[in-house]
Image (cartoon, helix red, strand yellow):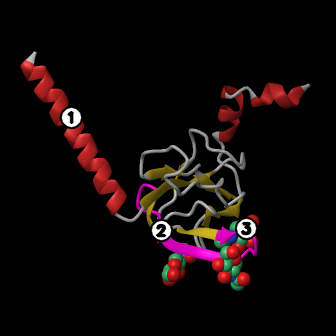
Amino acid sequence: MARSFAVVALFVSVVCFSSALARKTPERFFVEGKIYCDPCQFAFESRLSFPLPGVNVTLECIMEENDTVSYSRKSSTDANGLYSIPVRGDHEEEICVVVANPPNEGQCRQAMPNKSDRIILTKNMGAASQTRYVNPLGFMTQTTDPQCTDVVQELGLDKLFDD
Ligand SMILES: *[C@@H]1O[C@H](CO)[C@@H](O)[C@H](O)[C@H]1NC(C)=O
Ligand SMILES: *[C@@H]1O[C@H](CO)[C@@H](O)[C@H](O)[C@H]1NC(C)=O
Ligand SMILES: *[C@@H]1O[C@H](CO)[C@@H](O)[C@H](O)[C@H]1NC(C)=O
């Protein structure tokens, strides 16, 4: 009994200590996501999609009132098509999105919407984690992979368009 009380006390003090710490340090978030290549002109991710390394991405926050850019951070994707952009400060009042730059070489350069959904960069809306996962963004190839017809069948898309 005494022991479990000690464990609870330790737990409570750790929680208090870490929340006190969180209050002192300035807000810091990590905006993370993936850029992929869609070789089927589906404009969505399928099993034939693959990661795109070396794509430049920009996190951009704008002030809604006057459309001015208030915060901007650049990064690029790693070998696995992933990026992680460190962000400082609270951006509750701003509209923040990630925009991907179309690659200037390679097969996969055709843009589909290259702008993410809005990213909420504030602690004041419930999310405790400091990582914000962004919806995957992609680019399409001009020509389609022959295997795409299999995927169309697997997903039942052929039935969708047949009748
Ligand atoms: C835009 O609005 C923000 C907040 O109201 C203000 O701080 C900023 O100076 C404005 N910028 C311009 C260029 O008007
Ligand atoms: C996003 O794609 C459009 C074309 O669809 C392009 O005009 C625009 O420059 C791209 N944005 C960025 C930041 O590259
Ligand atoms: C990415 O950005 C860097 C520096 O801003 C630039 O030198 C490079 O050409 C860009 N790469 C692509 C693929 O746009």
The quadrant of the picture occupied by the C terminus is top right
Dot label at residue 11: 1
Quadrant assignment for ligand 2: bottom right
| Residue 13, percent from left and from top | 20, 40
Element marked by disc 3: loop
Q: Amino acid at mark 2?
A: Ser
Residue type for callout 3: Glu
Nearest the camera: 91 or 21? 21
* Badge 1 or badge 3: first in the primary sequence: 1
Front residue of this view, candidates 97 and 108:
97
* Distance between mark 3 and mark 2 Cα atoms: 26 Å
Q: Is mark 2 within 8 Å of ligand 3?
A: yes
Question: How packed is label 3: few (under 14 Cα within 10 Å), some, or many (20 or more)?
Answer: few
> Is 159 displayed left or right of 21 in the figure?
right
Labelled pair 3, 2 in contact (Cβ < 8 Å)? no
Q: Which residues are magenta?
A: 62-82
Q: Which residue is mark 2?
A: 76
Farthest-out residue, left: 3
Q: What element does badge 1 sit on?
A: helix
